Image (cartoon, rainbow, N blue to C red):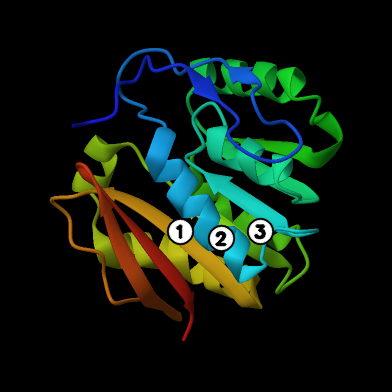
Amino acid sequence: MREKSRTTLRIGSGEMRGRTLLPPVGTATRPMTGLAKKSVFSIIQASGRLAGGVVLDLYCGTGTLGLEAISCGAKRCYFAERDRHAINRLKRNIEICSAEQAASVWAGNIETRLADWLAELESGSVDLAFVDPPYPSARRWNWDKITERIFQPLAGALACEGMVILRLPDDIQPKKTLSQLHLLRAKQYGQMTVAFYNLA
């Protein structure tokens, strides 16, 4: 069953566990919730990439994944989103979680601005990156262009043991390689697929 956009959103683990977050407006953004999020974060925490790490939450919507990462010990999360309604709720959710000191918001077109945003960070400093595009956008992706604009810059910013987590609708097969990123595993949860990548 496809996750409902109006499901109550809560931080599921870590020091902010139980805090209720504002959901997205409308149906275009479908945040990862429930068992899927719990499973994904179990994999991440087992890898040791969260404690004290730097995280990117791209196409973040209202920030549920990045805030979960902060709750689980990430020292900094950069949230990237272009929709102004989502950004307003993202900022409110950051306040709800008292995470202002650990959060930075990048507002704008991710595909055209990501490389410039990442240039502000130290090379190889990103431990974990979520890439969670709206399903309609993902279905329209030109993979060559997206690899050049998103995954190639991400590969350059990623730490040696870093990980990229890509969520897609289950009718799109994850690519085995994206620039220097190599597919580790892909797990299906209902009507979505979550793909885990690291540097090849």
Which residue does the image show at 57% across and 40% down from the upper left? 80
Q: Residue at x 54, y 73 (%)?
A: 155
How far across and down, in percent of the image, does residue 175 sit?
A: 26, 70
Report if the CB atoms under discs 3 and 2 are less than 8 Å apart.
no
Mark-to-mark CA distance, 3 and 2: 22 Å
Is 158 rendered above or below residue 131?
below
In terms of depth relative to the viewer, which is nearer, 82 or 171?
A: 171
Across and down, in percent, residue 163 comes to 54, 68
- The image position of residue 150, as x and y in percent, is 45, 59
Left or right of 94? Residue 137 is left
Q: Tag on residue 19? A: none
Q: Badge 1, how many Cα within 10 Å: few under 14, some, many 20+?
A: many
State the CA–CA distance, disc 2 to disc 1.
9 Å
Categorize mark 2 by other alpha carbons within 10 Å: few (<14), some (14-19), many (20+): some
Toward the viewer: 141 or 198?
198
For disc 2, the marked residue is 44
Q: Residue furthest bottom?
A: 200
Residue that carries the numbered disc 3 in the rendered image: 118
Amino acid type, residue under disc 3 in the picture = Leu
x and y, in percent, of residue 159 in the image: 67, 75
Q: Earlier in the sequence, mark 1 or mark 3?
A: 3
Residue holding disc 1: 165
Q: Residues within 10 Å of mark 3 (few under 14, many from 20)?
A: some
Q: Nearer the viewer, mark 1 or mark 3?
A: 1
